[in-house]
Amino acid sequence: MDFTLNESQIAVQKVAREFAEREMRPAVMRYDETQEFPHELVSKLGGLGFMGMTWPEELGGAGMTDLESIVIIEELARIDPSIALTVASHNSLCSGHIMLHASEEQK
């Protein structure tokens, strides 16, 4: 099996890695010590399309593949697993269930 990432996967990996290094790394200890929720980071992640990664573009999502979303979560988790979990759970447990079971109007 070939486990080499394709161009699209490498591109989203780069965006996620650069964001994590630039935005998350400087703040990670502060959030851990103060027990604050990183609202502004999550908002920025949403701006990158990371809070609706696998939703179709016609419904406001980023239209990414499952593998692209996994690559993003992995890059975020390198710096802060709790933020990565926030993104992963939002995309799968929360909005994933809406995508699977909601009416068209609710989506």
Image (cartoon, rainbow, N blue to C red):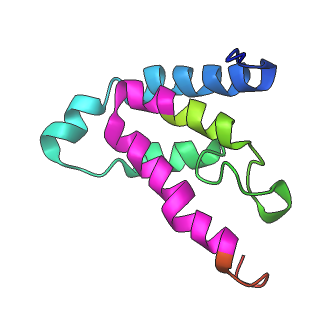
Q: Which of 13 and 48 is in front in this view?
A: 13
- Indicate left or right for 100 with 88 as reference: right
Quadrant containing the C terminus in the rendered view: bottom right
- Indicate left or right for 62 with 50 as reference: right
Query: Quick check: 98 above or below 34?
Result: below
Question: How many numbered marks does the figure carry?
Answer: 0
Q: What stretch is highlighted in magenta?
A: 74-100
For the stretch drawn in magenta, what is the main secondary structure?
helix
Identity of the residue drawn at 86% across and 61% down: 58
Q: Nearer the viewer, residue 79 or 25?
A: 79
Q: Where is residue 16 in the image (x, y as percent from the top left)?
A: 57, 28
Query: Quick check: 60 above or below 1?
Result: below
Identity of the residue drawn at 54% across and 58% down: 92
Quadrant containing the N terminus in the rendered view: top right
Identity of the residue drawn at 37% across and 26% down: 79
Quarter where residue 98 is shown: bottom right
Q: Find the residue positioned furthest to the front.
A: 1
Q: Which of 39 and 80 is in front in this view?
A: 80
Q: Find the residue positioned furthest to the left.
A: 33
User: Is residue 4 covered in magenta?
Assistant: no
Q: Position of residue 64 (x, y in %)?
A: 74, 43
Q: Find the residue positioned furthest to the right.
A: 58
Identity of the residue drawn at 49% across and 63% down: 93
Q: Nearer the viewer, residue 100 or 26?
A: 100
Q: Where is residue 17 in the image (x, y as percent from the top left)?
A: 53, 21
User: Is residue 94 covered in magenta?
Assistant: yes
Quarter where residue 34 is shown: top left
- Indicate left or right for 33 with 55 as reference: left
Query: Quick check: 20 above or below 35?
Result: above
Q: Position of residue 104 (x, y in %)?
A: 79, 81
